[in-house]
Amino acid sequence: MVDITVHKFGGSCLREKEDIERIAEIIKQSSDRPVIVVSALWGMTDRLIRAENDPTYAGRLVQDLRSQHLIFAPGLDLGPFGYLFEKVISGIENNLLEYTSGEASSNCKNLILAAGERLSALAIAHKLRDTGVDEAHPIGAEDIGLKLKGRTGATEIDIDMSSKYLDREKLTGIPILTGWFGEGEDGNIAVLSRGGSDHSAAAFANLLDARKLILWKDVDGIKRLNPRWGLDTPSIPYLGYEQAYELSMHGTPIIHRATVSPITELGIPVEVRNFHNPTSEPPTIIGPDLINKGVIAIGCHPGVAVISDDKPLSSLLLSKIEEYEITPWLMKSTPESMKLVIPTFDFDRLEEYVQGKTEFKTAIVSIIGDCKVPSEYEIVSKNEFATRIIIECENLSQEIRNLYHSLFSLQDCK
């Protein structure tokens, strides 16, 4: 049986015409059987969203989409997938007309949004065949039985239902699969949240029992600290699944939090590689959790609401936390007291159900690995993988840089 490697190419890998040629070279060099998951071309989803709300813009978008995809994949309209290309283009035009009339359903909106991934899969399949990869062919995720939990919008892929209904006979050759959407619980198209294409790739890796998943990005792996804080830090060689999930909750956008769950159960490793320079640095590998000594990385999420009361957490507040799918950083409740720590933007949705005292803090920081936390910080929680602390300061960027230098300089001196 041939090993499978799932390759995920996001919008950052689909900015220029030459990017599809680079994808072809990567696939040709794959030692395993490749399965490819793609996002829409760079900026395409944003353009489709704008078209839904602006009839004037929608009127000229269809021709722009045709031209842009033919620049990326010349001859697509005349090749073996030409009829599918024309079908998707005409579908966008019809759905936009329906949507901008004010009478469209939510399914119509999702059909418009999903068209970006469909066109991308067609363009890449055509280009791969044009370069000699004759087994490449595009597949819509919903056409092979990928099931999502929810209707219209969904938070995750239903692995159990997808495994039951997945049409593996269609996954021959080198399939180019659409990410980000699938079939909802009502049988119509449902879309995931932004970043959900990584989750799609992880789900396919699970369903196909892949040897590994490669997430192709425009950076050298996952950094010790998000560059937004003003430091260029080294890439992390290895992260455990729990550590990667923790970082994804604390301001590390390279990996979506939903990506981790489908691959954890089977122990499938994930490589985060630089698409534009694959051999520049070793990738960040995400795999089974290990107990580490020392600090590995720092994540930070600005805006924290700390809610406390001298009575237990109310059942109404708990039900709203579940309804809004909020993941608290801390939730403690006893007969005598409760404490809840959540993002500030989530507090806005819960405010009318909150009793007791609420304090707003600058940020929550997660220190990945094992460390001694400086005494001036309040510890929210601690386990073998990470320590969460509250930060209150006037200049968050400077505070994060100081904390980084403090923790890693102490570690380097040991």
Image (spheres, rainbow, N blue to C red):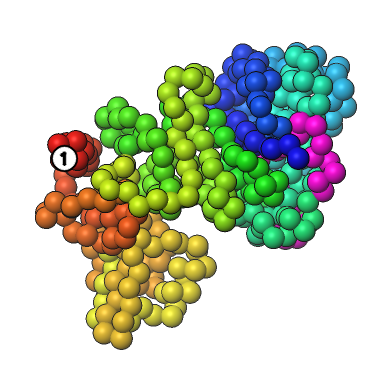
- Amino acid identity at mark 1: Lys
At 18% from the left and 59% from the top, the residue drawn is: 378
Q: Quadrant of the C terminus?
A: top left
Q: Position of residue 256 (x, y in %)?
A: 50, 45
At 22% from the left and 50% from the top, the residue drawn is: 371
At 82% from the left and 21% from the top, the residue drawn is: 134
At 88% from the left and 27% from the top, the residue drawn is: 83
The residue that mark 1 highlights is 414
Q: Which residues are magenta?
A: 167-187
Q: Nearer the viewer, residue 168 or 364?
A: 168
SS for tag 1?
Answer: loop
Q: Quadrant of the N terminus?
A: top right
Q: Nearer the viewer, residue 56 or 369?
A: 369
- Callout 1: 10 Å neighbours few (<14), some, many (20+)? few
Q: Is residue 169 magenta?
A: yes
For residue 271, say whether it is visible. yes
